[in-house]
Image: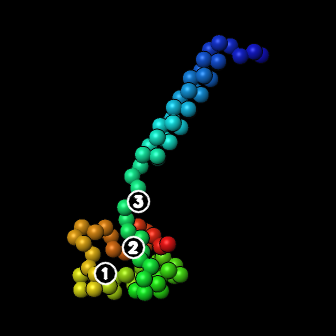
Amino acid sequence: MPPTPTNKTNSLLLNITFALSCGAILFFLFNAPGETTAKLPMNADHSRFQDMKKKEAEKYCTECHSPEGVHPLPEGHPPKYRCLFCHKRD
């Protein structure tokens, strides 16, 4: 059975809607801001954590990054138990 004009119109509208949606998503993704969170430093203090699993390594973060530690976290810092969720390793 040959396609009717209504089916062609609906199909064309669906294709145009799909293309515009894909274009909007790509536009949004290409204009997203860059990564601003600092990476886990590659230095002697952090080198032992590079090869550990994330959750295992995160157990040690509060040794230095606590109010009493060498490098306390800034005020308003997000939850302190998932450090390597934001601070990526190289």
- Circle 1: element type: loop
Residue bearing the label numbered 2: 83
Check if mark 3's residue and mark 1's residue have beta carbons within 8 Å.
Answer: no
How many numbered circles are shown? 3
Q: Position of residue 45 (x, y in %)?
A: 40, 86
Q: Label 2 to label 3, Cα distance in Å?
A: 15 Å
Q: Residues within 10 Å of mark 1 (few under 14, many from 20)?
A: some
Residue at horizontal 65%, vertical 12%? 5
Mark 2 or 1, nearer chain start: 1
Residue 81, located in which quarter of the rendered image? bottom left
Name above or below for residue 3 compared with residue 30.
above
- Circle 3: element type: loop
Name above or below for residue 73 compared with residue 15.
below
Mark 2 or 3, nearer chain start: 3
Left-right relation of 49 to 74: right
Residue 65, located in which quarter of the rendered image? bottom left
**Colour pattern of the rendering:** rainbow
Q: Which mark is residue 25?
A: none
Residue bearing the label numbered 1: 65
Q: Nearer the viewer, residue 31 or 79?
A: 31
Q: Nearer the viewer, residue 78 or 23?
A: 23
Left-right relation of 66 to 25: left
Q: Which mark is residue 35?
A: 3
> Label 2 sits on what residue type?
Cys
Residue at horizontal 22%, vertical 70%? 75
Check if mark 2's residue and mark 1's residue have beta carbons within 8 Å.
Answer: yes
Residue at horizontal 60%, vertical 22%? 12
